[in-house]
Image (cartoon, rainbow, N blue to C red):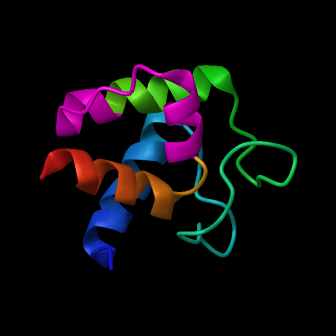
């Protein structure tokens, strides 16, 4: 189970990296971040900015586009991805 404080830190990092406000009602850990169902309407430039912010903050590189796409599906998958690589 991912620490709620870690999820909050990731949410803040993600929103700051993309210069987006938090959606009304908050951003759920399992909410889709990209695609037509996303309330944030993130695009490939946002993914690059998030990847760079993650590398700077946590020291985890996300070089493979398929792996990055899977990791950035939602906050929960991003947290799992980072936890696996930071231990």
The image quadrant of residue 2 is: bottom left
Count the numbered circles shown: 0
Residue 8, image x, y percentages: 36, 66
The residue lying at 50 percent from left, 33 percent from top is: 68
* Residue placed most toward the observer, 21 or 82: 82
Q: Is residue 29 left or right of residue 85?
A: right
75 in relation to 29, above or below? above
Residue 67, image x, y percentages: 50, 34
The residue lying at 60 percent from left, 69 percent from top is: 30
Residue 75, image x, y percentages: 49, 58
The image quadrant of residue 1 is: bottom left
The residue lying at 49 percent from left, 45 percent from top is: 71
Q: Tell me, yes or no, whether the highlighted magenta stretch contains residue 57.
A: yes
Q: In the displayed image of the protein, which residue is found farthest to the right?
A: 36
Q: Identify the magenta region.
A: 54-72
Q: Is residue 60 left or right of residue 40?
A: left
Residue 5, image x, y percentages: 27, 72
The image quadrant of residue 53 is: top left
- Magenta part, dominant SS: helix
Q: Is residue 52 left or right of residue 43?
A: left
């Amino acid at each position: 189970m991912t620490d709620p404080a870690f999820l909050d830190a990731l949410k803040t990092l993600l929103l700051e990296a993309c210069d987006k406000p938090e959606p009304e009602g908050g951003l759920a850990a399992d909410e889709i971040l990209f695609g037509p169902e996303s309330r944030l309407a993130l695009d490939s430039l946002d993914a690059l900015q998030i990847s760079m912010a993650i590398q700077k903050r946590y020291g985890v590189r996300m070089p493979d586009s398929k792996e990055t796409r899977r990791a950035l599906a939602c906050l929960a998958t991003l947290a799992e991805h980072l936890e696996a690589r930071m231990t």
